[in-house]
Image (spheres, rainbow, N blue to C red):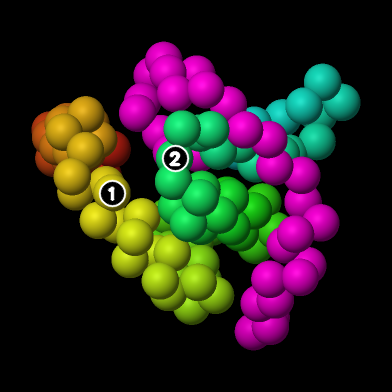
Amino acid sequence: MPRFKRQRLRDIPCVEVPKGHYSDAPSFGRVVRDKDGRKIATVRSDLPPRIKRHVALHERVHIKYGGGEIKTNLISAALDPIGFINTAFATVRNKERIRYYINRIKWFLKNKNKTNG
């Protein structure tokens, strides 16, 4: 099991993007590729500083350690528990994000039988 260190993660580039930059989802952040094909973390510029730091950490964990949301949330929560809690509260207070997650769950439930058999 690798040791998760915040210092190693800070070396991964992170850039700020405006709200609405991602037209397909109300994301707080995302991993994208730069023009040279390298993965970089992005975070919305309109977020409060504490949440912005945690989202940047979360996206950097995606890049460094791979894995899905559960693994990434566990690692980023262990490294920054207060930032994780702040980000979780910001998510549940955001109607746009709640609607997005409800639609994702509905899609998954509708299509789970199609993908499993």
Residue at 46 percent across and 32 percent down: it is 46
Please tell me whether mark 2 sits on a helix, a strand or a loop: loop
In the rendered view, tell whether residue 76 sits above or below residue 105. below
Q: In which quarter of the image is the N terminus?
A: bottom right
Residue type at mark 2?
Leu
Whether 20 is among the magenta residues is yes
Residue marked by disc 2: 47
Percent position (x, y) of residue 71?
46, 65
Q: Which residues make up the magenta segment?
A: 1-29
Percent position (x, y) of residue 101?
22, 38
In the rendered view, tell whether residue 34 sits above or below residue 90. above
Please tell me whether mark 1 sits on a helix, a strand or a loop: helix
Q: Quadrant of the C terminus?
A: top left
Percent position (x, y) of residue 81?
42, 74
> What numbered label is drawn on residue 90?
1
In the rendered view, tell whether residue 39 sits above or below residue 36. below
Pick whichever of labels 2 and 1 is earlier in the sequence. Answer: 2
